[in-house]
Amino acid sequence: MTKRFWELTGKNIDEADLSIMFLPVGSIERHGFHLPLGTDTLAPLFIAEKTAEKVGGLVLPPIWYGSCMAMRGHRGTFDISQEALSKYVGEILREAWRNGARLVVIVNGHGGNTPALHYTAREVSGNTGLAVIVVDWWRDVAVETRRSLFQKPGHAGEDETSAILAIAGHLVDIDTADRADVEYPPVRIYNRELEERIYSKALTGDARLASEEKGLEWLKAVIDELAEKVLEAARILGIK
Ligand SMILES: [Zn+2]
């Protein structure tokens, strides 16, 4: 049976195990010249589907729009406020709970969403019986694998480009892949001017070093580790 919630029939949903659901959240945002605008949603959707197959969960329809303040000056970026994102995700989580979910794993593909997602997870779990996990897939799991495979992490850089080559290579225009040597600050600095400077090319790192092979290896490690963590969480929660 399909793991995609939107493909289930009424009969399917009556028979399905609803306890674990995955919610991919991403963005519509410029990623250099060479990656698709939906990069940050395509990756978590792929990871959520593969992980759901391993742990026996269902995948909710992804949220394509995210909070993209740093890249809003670039054509192709839709910037949704933290408040709107939080409210929308919160209502989806409540509906998942009302439909029978016990644990929702939010697989986030975009850094600008992270504060809103954690805030919302805290808020909804405090007012329902739902358990929520928020995972920034590129930095919360398979950290060592990422470090060993890629020279530098980057927005639309070597690592992210490798992942999209592996997930949806037909959407990558590798001939336009570029590099941008930018220095990330040692701590998180909230400052619009600085963020706009860092992301002036909507790219950080060196996308020309990317390969499908590296992407496949990274994604496999991400999916394996995420599946392990979700199963462990389900055991702790007494779900499976
Ligand atoms: Zn991205």
Image (cartoon, rainbow, N blue to C red):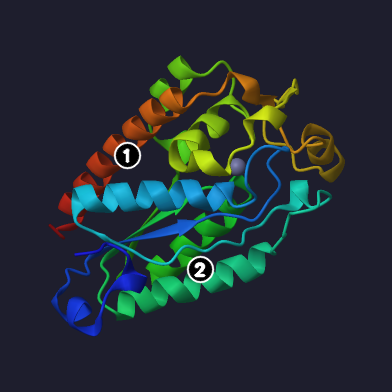
Q: Is residue 128 shown to the viewer in this render?
A: no
Q: Is residue 101 above or below residue 234?
A: below
Give the label on residue 223, or none. Answer: 1
Residue located at (71% from left, 33% from top) = 203
What secondary structure is found at the residue carrying circle 1? helix
Q: Quadrant location of residue 85?
A: bottom right
Q: Quadrant of ligand 1?
A: top right
Residue located at (37% from left, 26% from top) = 217
54 lies left or right of 183: left
Q: For the view shown, which residue lies furthest in the right direction?
A: 193
Residue located at (71% from left, 31% from top) = 176
Residue 178 pos. (x, y %)? 72, 26
Amino acid type of the residue that numbered disc 1 sits on in the rendered structure: Ile
Residue 183 pos. (x, y %)? 74, 22
What secondary structure is found at the residue carrying circle 2? helix
Inter-mark Cα distance, 2 to 1: 23 Å
Query: Is the CB of the residue bearing disc 1 within 8 angstroms of ligand 1?
Result: no
Q: Is residue 26 above or below residue 128?
A: above
Please state which of the two labelled residues, at mark 2 or mark 1, is closer to the viewer: 1
Q: Quadrant location of residue 158?
A: top right
Disc 2: which residue: 89
Q: Is residue 144 above or below residue 113?
A: above
Q: Residues within 10 Å of mark 2 (few under 14, many from 20)?
A: many
Residue 146 pos. (x, y %)? 45, 24
In the image, 172 versus 53, the foreground residue is: 172
